[in-house]
Image: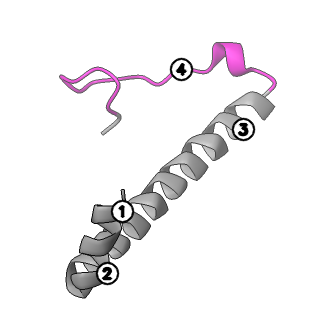
Amino acid sequence: MKSYLKFLSRNKLYTAIEAVGLAVSLAFVIIIGSYVWQQYAVTWENPDRERVYVPESSPFPGSAM
């Protein structure tokens, strides 16, 4: 661990790229998680949630086009 921290302190550009990549990936995880949570909450509040279905006509199951 000590050698890796020394490597990061010597390579500033690499460290910046790694930090930006981590921040962007964490942002996408938060956005996707928020979307999933919102969709689940909307479905759960529906009183007829047991009867909700999506008609499909596409060749790929689960994709609504």
Q: Reading the chain from its start, which is encountered first: label 2 or label 1?
A: 1
- What label does residue 2 carry, if any? 1
Q: Position of residue 21 (x, y in %)?
A: 31, 68
Q: What residue sits right under mark 4 in the picture?
A: 53
Residue pictured at 65% horizontal, 14% vertical: 51
The amino acid type, in three-letter code, at marker 1 is Lys
- What label does residue 34 carry, if any? none
Q: CA distance from mark 2 to mark 4?
A: 55 Å
Q: CA distance from mark 2 to mark 1?
A: 11 Å
> How dense is the environment of label 4, judged by Cα within 10 Å: few (below 14), some, or many (20 and up)?
few
Q: CA distance from mark 3 to mark 4?
A: 16 Å
Closer to the observer: label 3 or label 2? Answer: 2
The kind of secondary structure element at disc 1 is helix
**Direction from residue 21 to residue 38 in the image, left or right:** right
Residue pictured at 71% horizontal, 21% vertical: 49
Q: Position of residue 35 (x, y in %)?
A: 56, 49
The kind of secondary structure element at disc 4 is loop
Q: Reading the chain from its start, which is encountered first: label 2 or label 4?
A: 2
Q: CA distance from mark 4 to mark 1?
A: 55 Å
Closer to the observer: label 1 or label 3? Answer: 1
Q: What residue sits right under mark 3 in the picture?
A: 41
